[in-house]
């Protein structure tokens, strides 16, 4: 990168943001594009939708604005976007505080951080441009200069909606510096910036005895009060509270429910009347999104307090539970590891998946459905079909419980334990077994876990290991198969020929002798039994395969062994079962002969070249699977 050229480009971009003009100039722009003057909730909604949206496999919308940082929170994000969608239409819901409630490490702070940083970037684009009265400490909308009596006519003739009044500072400025001629009032473009305290505010509660309300609403400026004489003069007041500077944008209220009541009363007025009560002044209009986040215990205590009923009625609650999909959990850890400076340690395949299985298992609640184990539920949530259940049953399972995902192991715990394992001296590769050992060791150091919970989590580690055992065996057996794709294709074609003959009550023609024979029931059952298809269910399963072939053919899509998930599993298991003895002998031999050594080296090379292993974890995998097969 040519830094000097980029600096020049950056300065040019900054210069474009330095637009200045008069109210008359600004009004001309608003007439041409009334969206320039949209309110804060509308601006946030437009920002989210501008990034794009698509339908997820589970039917939930996936918002591109969030999907590079947040994973597995589709339902919560949909509720948040629905809130902004309604608020953007100026419905009553905009006069509510958005409260995100969920367990630690669930993504609440990340959601708010994305909204804040997103607004900063969006305000620097043409679509998100924001203009304010120059010199106003609250960066207020220039249309507030329009007298109340003219506003209905303005909306009727130009479709321009004006809401709100001038702050005391601007009211004084218009009267003393412009003699009431609003068309000459200077207007400039602003870019939201939390660092520069423009349009983005953050309030953190501290000791109620020492924390002053001025942090929220500003306070008297002692350096100028001697000059102006009275406290009610706007020049003697600092409009620099978090609610003041967040006007037109967003205010994050961290752990709102831990605040002293006097701070909550200010929020009640803001949400109910969209006004801030400050010092010696009348109500000051504020247009801003207020987002807070808290944990479940704090929220339950808040709801149980009768004194807070008025504020409770002004809150829109969105639960933000832990993610419940293994594939999304893996993406969380991949993101966190990418952000680190770690580059010299290899992460073996399935390591993050095995850690994710443990984490998600800890968050699931038991199902009332017969035969529904925690592992089956985990796979269904991740979009897999399992024995007796389909992925489409996920919604019904979710409706069984209200709190699922609100308890369990947090992503922070998992990444902390993985980080601890990654930095150990001499480690060059992190394997699934090493990761599970680190997760298990961490439970002993976790003082807040009860004895019963400790045992429950140890059982989940055992379940995750059993799942990995199957993955490991499958991985090695697949690597041992020479020309696996060709073998699978041949077996599939033989199976389909027989299935078609069975369903159509015809015979199969031998490819060599051309003799007509009855369908090979033994072959078909040897494949179907690999995935538990019973004798009574075989006819329905075979018909289902033919229906899938027909459906794909209508779309011009060829059918192969991957086109049907359960058939794919059956084909692979059948091939692996035929190879099991070869794998067992080769992997468990302590002193392999030349032929066995060549086969082992071929398998290691294939694991490295095609499956993402390094030589360290590939050899570890072979030794581990050899141990499993000899048990």
Image (cartoon, grey):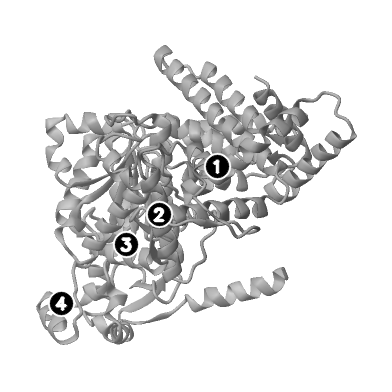
For label 1, the SS is helix
Asked whether the residues under the numbered discs 4 and 3 touch, taking CB atoms below 8 Å apart as contact, a structural biologist would say no
Indicate which disc residue 241 carries: none
Give residue 153's position: percent from left, percent from top: 11, 83
Residue name at image x 40 percent, y 60 percent: 198
Asked whether the residues under the numbered discs 3 and 2 touch, taking CB atoms below 8 Å apart as contact, a structural biologist would say no
- In the image, 474: left or right of 232? right
For label 3, the SS is loop
Give residue 499's position: percent from left, percent from top: 46, 52
Pick whichever of labels 4 and 3 is earlier in the sequence: 3
Asked whether the residues under the numbered discs 4 and 2 touch, taking CB atoms below 8 Å apart as contact, a structural biologist would say no
Give residue 18's position: percent from left, percent from top: 47, 76
Indicate which disc residue 138 carries: 3
- In the image, 485: left or right of 223? right
Indicate which disc residue 333 carries: 1
Pick the front one: 235 or 516: 516
Give residue 242's position: percent from left, percent from top: 34, 51
For label 2, the SS is helix
Asked whether the residues under the numbered discs 1 and 4 touch, taking CB atoms below 8 Å apart as contact, a structural biologist would say no
Measure how far apart labels 1 and 2 are at the Cα level.
47 Å
Pick whichever of labels 1 and 3 is earlier in the sequence: 3
Pick the front one: 144 or 602: 602
Label 2: which residue?
503
Label 4: which residue?
147
Dividing the picture into quadrants, the one containing residue 607 is top right
- In the image, 195: left or right of 57? right
For residue 225, above or below residue 123: above
């Amino acid at each position: 990168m040519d830094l000097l050229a980029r600096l020049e480009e950056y300065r040019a971009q900054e210069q474009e943001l330095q637009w200045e003009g008069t109210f008359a100039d600004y009004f001309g722009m608003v007439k041409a594009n009334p969206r320039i003057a949209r309110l804060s909730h509308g601006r946030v909604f437009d920002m989210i939708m501008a990034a794009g949206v698509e339908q997820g496999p589970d039917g939930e919308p996936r918002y591109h604005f969030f999907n590079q940082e947040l994973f597995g929170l589709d339902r919560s994000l949909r509720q948040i976007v629905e809130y902004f969608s309604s608020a953007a239409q100026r419905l009553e819901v905009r006069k509510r505080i958005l409260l995100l409630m969920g367990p630690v490490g669930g993504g609440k702070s990340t959601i708010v951080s994305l909204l804040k940083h997103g607004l900063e970037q969006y305000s620097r684009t043409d679509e998100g441009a924001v203009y304010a009265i120059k010199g106003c400490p609250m960066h207020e909308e220039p249309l507030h200069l329009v007298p109340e009596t003219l506003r209905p006519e303005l909306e009727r003739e130009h479709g321009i909606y004006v809401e709100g009044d001038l702050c005391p500072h601007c009211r004084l400025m218009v009267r003393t510096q412009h003699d009431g001629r609003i068309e000459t009032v200077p207007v400039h473009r602003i870019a939201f910036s939390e660092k520069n305290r423009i349009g983005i505010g953050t309030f953190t509660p501290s000791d109620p005895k020492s924390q002053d309300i001025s942090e929220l609403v500003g306070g008297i400026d002692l350096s100028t009060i001697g000059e102006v004489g009275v406290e009610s003069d706007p020049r003697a007041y600092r409009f620099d509270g978090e609610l003041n500077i967040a006007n037109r944008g967003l205010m994050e209220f961290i752990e709102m429910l831990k605040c002293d009541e006097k701070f909550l009363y200010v929020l009640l007025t803001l949400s109910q009347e969209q006004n801030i009560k400050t010092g010696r002044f009348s109500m000051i209009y504020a247009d801003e999104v207020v987002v807070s986040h808290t944990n479940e215990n704090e929220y339950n205590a808040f709801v149980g307090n009768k004194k807070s009923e008025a504020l409770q009625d002004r809150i829109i609650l969105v639960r933000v539970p832990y993610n419940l999909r293994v594939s999304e959990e893996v993406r969380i850890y991949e993101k966190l590891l990418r952000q680190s400076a770690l580059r010299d340690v290899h992460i073996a395949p399935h390591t993050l998946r095995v850690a994710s299985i443990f984490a998600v298992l800890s968050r699931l609640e038991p199902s009332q459905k017969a035969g529904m184990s925690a592992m089956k539920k985990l796979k269904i949530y991740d979009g897999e079909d399992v024995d007796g259940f389909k992925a489409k049953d996920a919604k019904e399972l979710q409706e069984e419980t209200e709190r699922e995902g609100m308890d369990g192991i947090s992503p922070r715990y998992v990444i902390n334990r993985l980080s601890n394992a990654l930095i150990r001296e001499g480690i060059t590769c992190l394997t699934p077994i090493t990761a599970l050992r680190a997760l298990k060791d961490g439970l002993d150091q976790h003082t807040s876990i009860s004895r019963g919970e400790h045992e429950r989590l140890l059982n989940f580690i055992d379940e995750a290991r059993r799942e990995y055992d199957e993955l490991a065996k499958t991985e090695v057996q697949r690597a041992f198969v020479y020309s696996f794709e060709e073998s699978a294709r041949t077996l599939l074609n033989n199976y389909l020929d027989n299935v078609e003959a069975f369903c159509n009550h015809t015979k199969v023609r031998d490819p060599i002798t051309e003799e007509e024979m009855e369908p090979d029931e033994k072959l078909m059952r040897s494949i179907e039994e690999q995935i538990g298809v019973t004798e009574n269910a075989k006819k329905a399963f075979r018909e289902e395969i033919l229906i899938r072939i027909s459906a794909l053919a209508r779309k011009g899509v060829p059918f192969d062994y991957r086109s049907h998930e359960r058939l794919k599993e059956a084909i692979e298991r059948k091939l692996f079962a035929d190879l099991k003895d070869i794998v067992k002998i080769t992997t468990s031999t302590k002193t392999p002969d030349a032929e066995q050594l060549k086969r082992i080296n071929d398998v290691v090379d294939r694991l490295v070249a095609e499956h993402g292993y390094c030589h360290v974890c590939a050899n570890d995998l072979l030794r581990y699977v050899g141990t499993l097969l000899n048990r």
